Amino acid sequence: MVIFLVILDSKEIIKISEKYGIGFDIKCDEIASVKSRRNKLAHGDISFEEQGRQDSIEYMIVLKDKTVEYLNEFILAVDYYITNSKYRRL
C-alpha cells in the first residue's frame, strides 16, 4: 500500500514549476481538498472517525485517483525536465 502525504496544493506546485522552468501548469482542485483534510487530521481539528462519516468511499476513491493522476503528471514533467537537461538553461 502506498500512502501519499500531500503537503502542497496545485498552486504551490505550479509556483515551484515556474521558478525552475518545469513545463507544468495543470491545476487540480482535488489535491487542495486532500491537503485540507490531511491538515485537519494532523492538527487534531477532526478525528478519523468524524472525517470518515462526512464522505462516501466512492468520493474518497475519486479524490485519491485524481490526486495520484495529478502527481504522476507532475513526476513526468520533472522527469522530462531532468532527462532533457532543461535545468542547464537557467
Image (cartoon, grey):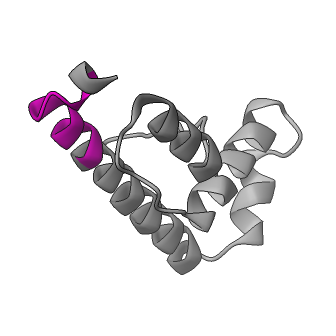
Q: Is residue 43 left or right of residue 89?
A: right
Say if 52 sits above or below 87 in the image: below
Let me know if residue 1 appears in the view: no
Q: Residue at x 32, y 41 (%)?
A: 2
> Looking at the rendering, in which quadrant would you find the C terminus?
top left
88 relative position to 54: left or right: left
> In the image shown, does 85 or 78 lie closer to the viewer?
85
Residue 46 is situated, as x and y percent measured from the top left of the image, at 85, 46
Q: Is residue 53 above or below residue 34?
A: below
| For residue 12, above or below residue 42 | below
Chain part drawn in magenta: 77-87
Front-lying residue, 1 or 8: 8
Residue 84 part of the magenta-drawn span: yes
Residue drawn at point x = 22 percent, y = 31 percent: 86
Q: Position of residue 63 (x, y in %)?
A: 53, 66
Residue located at (68% from left, 43% from top): 38
